[in-house]
Image (spheres, rainbow, N blue to C red):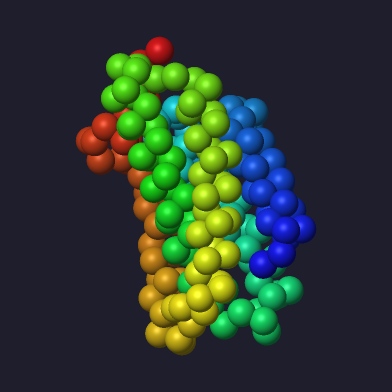
Amino acid sequence: MNWKRNVTAFLIISALGTLGHFVYEWSGQNTALGFIFPVNESVWEHLKLLFFPTVIYSVFEYFKVKEKYDNYISSVVLSVFYGMLMIVVIYYVSKGLFGRDVELINISSYYVAVILMLVKQNKILENESFASRNFKIIFLFLLVAVAFLFIIWSYKSPMAEIFIPPIP
């Protein structure tokens, strides 16, 4: 992938994610919008800010690059999962180091995760790995499963720290 594509992807995904942070509140806490936009400040809910903008951007980009990359779908799914993992890791490592939430680190981690996600996607595309039809099916299933979990766990989340909003 070229530099222009990466900058464009970064700007669009970051802008959608940043705006997405406020949509649920702006909508008057519309339940349907809460399925794809964060309903609280938990780490889990903030993963939506990377997941859904990346999926939306990738659907449009797919039609532009599908002939060039047999592994595009796999690269998107693997890289978005990697980006979400980076948000979780950065959050809990910084919280462990500082003993509390550091807002600047939390905000920065999103943009760092977008960059790391795009770097990971480029590596997967360049290696031409995970290109078989079976991988595409498996990864699409995983993508839909995670989207479904975001919907279900928006309002009925398990009792785990990642789902609990931090106390200010």
Asked if residue 43 is positioned above or below residue 133 in the image, the reply reads above
- Between residue 60 and residue 11, name the one nearer to us: 11
- Between residue 161 and residue 82, name the one nearer to us: 82
Q: Residue furthest left?
A: 159
Which residue is painted at 46% across and 78% down in the image? 129
Image quarter in which the C terminus is found: top left
Q: Residue furthest bottom?
A: 133
- The location of residue 104, given as percent across then percent down, is 53, 22
Which residue is painted at 58% across and 27% down in the image? 25
Q: Is residue 146 left or right of residue 5?
A: left
Q: Is residue 3 left or right of residue 59?
A: right
- The location of residue 144, given as percent across then percent down, is 44, 64
Asked if residue 135 is positioned above or below residue 55 in the image, the reply reads below
Which residue is painted at 52% across and 79% down in the image? 128
Asked if residue 50 is positioned above or below residue 159 in the image, the reply reads below
How many marks on residues? 0
Image quarter in which the N terminus is found: bottom right
- The location of residue 82, given as percent across then percent down, is 43, 54
Q: Quadrant of residue 92?
A: top left
Which residue is painted at 39% across and 48% down in the image? 85
Instruction: Note whether residue 136 is visible.
Output: no
Q: Residue furthest top?
A: 168
Asked if residue 78 is positioned above or below residue 104 in the image, the reply reads below
Q: Is residue 102 left or right of residue 163?
A: right
Instruction: Note whether residue 67 is visible.
Output: yes
Q: Residue furthest right?
A: 4
